[in-house]
Image: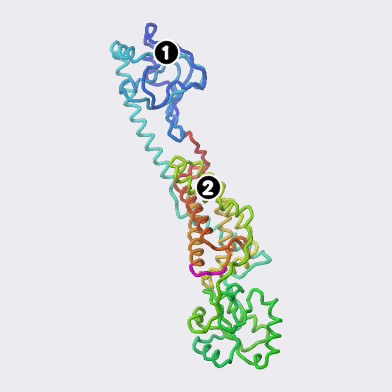
Amino acid sequence: MEATEKPAGAEVAAGLNLSHLGQEVSVPAGARIVSQGEDPEFFYVIQSGRVRVFRETADRIQTNLTELGAGAYFGEVALVTGQPRSASVEALEDATIIKVSKAEFDRLLDQNPQLARQIIQQLASWLVTGDQRVEAEVVHQVKLRQVSWFDFVLMMGLSLVLSLVVNIYNDNRIPLVHGWGDKGLISEISLNQALEMYQKNQAIFVDARKSAFYSQEHIKGATNLPEILFDLMFPMFQFTLTQTAGDKDKTLVVYGGTFSRRMDIDLARLLKHKGLERVVVLEDYSGWPKVFPLKKKEASAPGSLPLGFAGFLEWLPLSIFLLILIPPIRRSPYLSVFCRVLLAAIFISFALSKIMRPAVFALNVVDYNLTPAWGVNLWSLALPWGELVVGLFLLLGIRTRAAATLIGAMNVIFIVGLVNAILHHMPINCGCVGEVGEPVNWVKVMKNTGMLIMCIQIFLYDRFLVLDRGGFILRDRKI
């Protein structure tokens, strides 16, 4: 708190006869007169000019206490208590002051009871003012750190509205729930029935998954017809059926093995649309590896694509591990600004690569095998817009604690997906930028863990250029 009024003891100090005491010195503007923590040696009376009194932390965060003008005094507290200086003083303009030694100060108190009483009154006033200041700062910090449901509703609601509106006018739009409006149900067959048909050679088994999954493990003798490459591969599949004696009359049993049922049911529908009537899907989408003879081989790494500038930025969160070990840096609001800008750049970059092609991102969501059919398209539409909106909020300093919480939640979800994919040896890429991306591995988990730590740092220590409920504030090192 800054004070421009004359302190209560100014008249007393101005009335003192110091002609026989102390030493008059000139101090240029900006010069440090007293340093916090040093041993007390002098009492100071200001003859002319102005000075400011402030405290400073180890990481150089300054708190202005007051300003003093001509006739005021300072330095008496440390002399009375015998403790190191509790604050620093520097000249705001060219000033003239009188330095009085401790011995002279003691004699001055003995000869001027009025000055002693005034110092006691001033100390009591400072205690009351200090308590009020601490209370006001604590209240402000609590209000700044509050995260209400409105913050989350604002960001998630804005993301959802934008995703739905843009999807309506997007040439690559997708339905909110995949499969809505598709006519004709696909018949299902139990695992036991399918196994019996397999043993009697009465069916052709068609694997609808991507080639990497098929190569890793599939029913022995099954044909791979990836749903995403149907238009390209169906002519050859149809030619094989017509050229092989008896195959054209067999039932086509389609299986896929994904929680969303995205691959197998979609492929069955496409085959139906091509005029093939005897098409069924396995009722237990995930049970076929337990009952059918399998052909397996070690999974090969799928094709990957560097993520460009965003991929380079993803390495920077790993350095946060080291910075977090240094307490002054760990608590620095400037580190929070760095984390905010970095996370915003990463998430905005990834979001822009997925927003206009939601169908491609939906297939990446399916690869993780964690999302039910009804949630795939909704997640694929809303998540990129959520990344964009939350990234912009972080960048602009709006509701940063709530934004950091949402980005942290996204990272937790992604880490769970990555670990699940690694433990189940899924041959997939991260899908960060569309069809491809970086391989799913423990390095990718470490990168996202670094981003999660950055979110925690923002949540705890961000207070620089922040828009809180009291308006936009510049909370720099001078509080």
- Image spot of residue 99 (x, y percent): 40, 14
Give the vertical position of 478 relative to 230 (above or below). above
Magenta stretch?
423-427
User: Which of the pair 258/222 is nearer the observer?
Assistant: 222
* Foreground residue among 218 and 187: 218
Looking at the image, residue 81 sits to the left or right of residue 302; the answer is left
**Magenta segment: does it hold 385?**
no
Q: Which residue is mark 1?
A: 98
Q: Nearer the viewer, residue 147 or 326?
A: 326
Please tell me which residue is depicted at 60% across the width and 57% down the height of the picture.
350
- Distance from disc 1 to disc 2, alpha carbons, whole Å, reads 48 Å
Query: Pointer 1: residues within 10 angstroms few (<14), some, or many (20+)?
Result: many
Q: Residue furthest front?
A: 298
Magenta run includes residue 426: yes
User: In percent of the image, x 55 and y 72: which residue is there?
Assistant: 298
Res 39 quadrant in image: top left
Q: Is residue 134 visible?
A: yes
The residue tagged 2 is 339
- Overall secondary structure of the magenta stretch? loop
N-term mark: 1 or 2: 1
